[in-house]
Amino acid sequence: MREDGKMVVGKHRNTKVIVDLGAIKENVAQEKRQLEADQKLFAVVKANAYGHGLVEVAQAASQAGADGFCVAVIDEGVALRQAGFEQEPILILGVNPASEATYMASYNLSVAVSSLDFLQAAQPELLKAKLKLRVHLALDTGMGRIGFKDVATLKEAVAYLNANPQAFVFEGIFTHFAQADSKDTSYYHQQLAKFKELTGSLEQLPPYVHVANSAAALWHHDCGGNVIRYGISMYGLNPSGRELELPRPLKPALSLVSELVHVKQVAKGESIGYGSTYTASEDEWIGTVPLGYADGWLRRMQGFAVLIAGQYCPIVGRVCMDQFMVKLPANLALGTKVTLIGKDGSEEITAQDVADYAHTIHYEITCCLGERLPRIYRE
Ligand SMILES: *Cc1c(COP(=O)(O)O)cnc(C)c1O
């Protein structure tokens, strides 16, 4: 415990997220080699670096050539500044309250802006504080999330920025694709055309113009812009799930491992877990694994499998908050390694396999790995 009462995540648990920083560096370095001379790579490290650990991933990405960072919320940007990233551009991709404008500016964070209202509300505070906020105007070209949708409102915002150089630095303009990871490229092309139409209406563009996420960087190399926002592929995962083949190999960085903490034989007819949803159909060896849905190993993983001693062992009974049970092939020793995501011998369970079973995407699987899991870093 710290004096402020917050829990410190130590290295005491026998359940761990293992992050291969070497893989992250290779993925970043490989992508950097694909870029044009004038293009920068911003490492997207929002959501605790998709569960991999904000500061450690940012450091690895930076060592491998990342030129800046993208985060989702203010606190993530401040955490990077406090970790020693004093000069690097840090862009907050989400919309924030105008009342936070001076706070963001005081940390020299860049911020996505989606309305003239934000600028008008932020301006007096910024003037009073004598701070300038770095602004990236978001354009909604078809994602339907945030951003300016038409030439008239965009031009108003640009005029306002240009009229208030004491309060704002007009640093960037960008959009986000909804389907850059799709076999059908028509919606992608529609969005790109819309982006060109909107930006083409401006007399002058800001220094940073950007459209690419990982999917566009991989499958639409000619999408343009002078920054790519590289997220999921930095972590070694295919943005499309299983829809599109990767144009070049990526190295997954994350594994999730634990150990058997309890092993017992149960007799035919005995049941396991809340609701007694599993009943042994013969005498069986059952092991207990010490993580659960509070760690992001969700209840819907009931019936999936983990790797133990190189074999797939089914999860039996409901996943509890902090533990779950597996059916073992034999009486295995306490402390035997359990692999939930990663390789064991010749077998592998990928984040994509977990996502398929959970009817979701691998992004959600790694992002939901809880804060209380220790992260162990390897090169
Ligand atoms: C999260 C995010 C990204 C990164 O997307 P990946 O698919 O992980 O590469 C890029 N841009 C914006 C606006 C985002 O919100």
Image (spheres, helix red, strand yellow):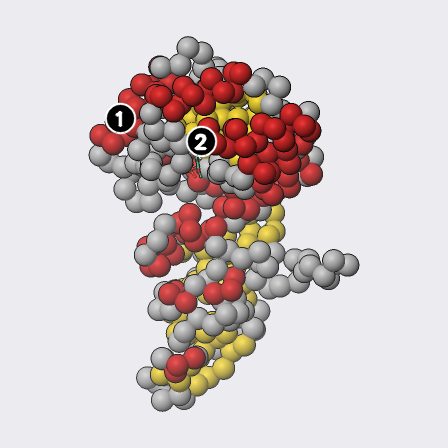
Q: Is residue 216 visible?
A: no
Above/below status of 222 relative to 57 = above
Q: Is residue 3 visible?
A: yes
Q: Nearer the viewer, residue 78 or 232?
A: 78
Please state, as top left, top right, bottom left or bottom right, where the N terminus lies in the image. Answer: bottom right
Q: Residues within 10 Å of mark 1 (few under 14, many from 20)?
A: some
Where does the image place residue 289, in percent across and percent down from the top left? 51, 70
Where does the image place residue 101, in percent across and percent down from the top left? 59, 34
Give the number of callouts. Answer: 2
Q: Amino acid at mark 2?
A: Ser
At x 50%, y 32%, the residue is 118
Of the residues tagged 2 and 1, which is closer to the observer? 2
Q: Amino acid at mark 1?
A: His
Q: Residues within 10 Å of mark 2 (few under 14, many from 20)?
A: some
SS for dot 1:
helix
Cα distance between the residues tagged 2 and 1: 25 Å
**Quarter location, residue 179:** top left
At x 40%, y 23%, the residue is 154
* CB-based contact (under 8 Å), mark 2 and mark 1: no
Where does the image place residue 41, in percent across and percent down from the top left? 50, 26
Q: Which residue is mark 1?
A: 189
Ligand 1 closer than 8 Å to label 2 CB: no
Q: Which residue is mark 2?
A: 115
Q: Nearer the viewer, residue 226 or 237?
A: 226
At x 60%, y 38%, the residue is 100
SS for dot 2:
loop
Q: Nearer the viewer, residue 352 or 331?
A: 352
Above/below status of 316 relative to 255 = below
- Does residue 349 appear left or right of residue 55 in this picture? left
- Does residue 231 appear left or right of residue 248 in this picture? right
- Does residue 230 appear left or right of residue 186 in this picture? right
